[in-house]
């Protein structure tokens, strides 16, 4: 198992109750960090496990589209911990898949509101917390859908391409001010989102899995370790990158 030292560091994670967000929260907790978690859903089992492990954490329940929810979340971080060292903006949705001409304005807008507009607010609040310290790491969760196109997922793909572009722009603007900014681009990872995408039928994903050089689906913990690496001093020379973690899917 990889070993990182985040003792006395404060980490914010959105979309933290399940999947990649939860795995990343555990990874940081086990590395000594204090964590602030935000999610639309309150996973009582997860929160109880954190308590049993004597983790130092706070949890905020709310919709990231609500500016006041995000402001309250970041205010609570300052009130409880007094600083912010790492922000992993992970929350997002896959949208409603289907042919572009059958997509609705409502579905398109909802996907962009969550994956891009709400993300922008999280970025702003993260930067405002980190800039006075002149140090910090900001990691955005994009997707391999931010690196290439996929039919029948136009809103999702458009939003994730925007996340990758935003990452590059932010890195150019804030790297000299001590803020390291990168994006992770997961492929097929065993998460509730993939369960929804496949309808619970892993056989439906067999063609995509077969295209992976590694020949298997990824685990949320693997993404979590990449987020940790992009948040530690040893990765300081990695700036503005959108790093695919996909078992080799995007090689071909």
Image (cartoon, helix red, strand yellow):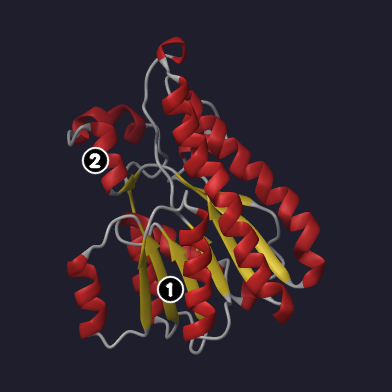
Vertical placement of residue 222 versus 189, above or below: below
Rendered residue at 72%/73% (across/down): 131
Considering every residue shown, the one lying at the far front of the view is 68
Rendered residue at 46%/10% (across/down): 101
Instruction: Please tell me which residue lies in front, 115 or 147.
Output: 115
* Residue 1 in view, yes or no: no
From the top left corner, tell me how far across and down residue 12 is, in percent.
Answer: 48, 70
Q: Quadrant of the N terminus?
A: bottom left
Residue 206 quadrant: top left
Identify the mark at residue 78; answer none if there is no mark: none
Vertical placement of residue 84 versus 103, above or below: below
Residue receiving disc 1: 36
Rendered residue at 29%/49% (across/down): 191
Q: Give the class, few, some or many, for how many residues have Cα within 10 Å of label 2's Cα (few <14, many ≥20).
A: few
Rendered residue at 33%/32% (across/down): 210
Residue receiving disc 2: 195
Q: Is residue 33 left or right of residue 165?
A: left
Q: Give the class, few, some or many, for how many residues have Cα within 10 Å of label 1's Cα (few <14, many ≥20).
A: many
């Amino acid at each position: 198992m990889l070993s990182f030292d985040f003792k006395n560091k404060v980490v914010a994670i959105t979309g933290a109750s399940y999947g990649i967000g939860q795995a990343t929260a555990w990874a940081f907790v086990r590395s000594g960090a204090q964590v602030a978690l935000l999610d639309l859903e309150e996973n009582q089992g997860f929160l109880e496990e954190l308590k049993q492990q004597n983790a130092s954490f706070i949890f905020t329940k709310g919709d990231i589209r609500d500016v006041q929810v995000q402001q309250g979340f970041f205010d609570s971080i300052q009130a409880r911990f007094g600083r912010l060292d790492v922000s992993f903006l992970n929350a997002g949705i896959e949208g409603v898949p289907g042919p572009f001409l059958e997509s609705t304005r409502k579905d398109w807008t909802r996907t962009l509101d969550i994956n891009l507009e709400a993300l922008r607010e999280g970025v702003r609040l993260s930067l405002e917390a980190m800039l006075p310290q002149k140090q910090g790491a900001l990691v955005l969760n994009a997707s391999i859908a931010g690196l290439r196109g996929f039919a029948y997922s136009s809103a999702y793909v458009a939003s994730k391409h925007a996340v990758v572009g935003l990452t590059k722009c932010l890195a150019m603007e804030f790297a000299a001010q001590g803020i390291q900014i990168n994006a992770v681009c997961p492929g097929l990872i065993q998460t509730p989102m993939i369960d929804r995408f496949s309808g619970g039928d892993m056989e439906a994903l067999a063609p995509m899995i077969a295209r992976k050089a590694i020949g298997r689906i990824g685990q949320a913990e693997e993404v979590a370790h990449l987020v940790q690496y992009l948040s530690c001093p040893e990765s300081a020379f990695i700036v503005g990158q959108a790093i695919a973690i996909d078992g080799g899917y995007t090689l071909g």
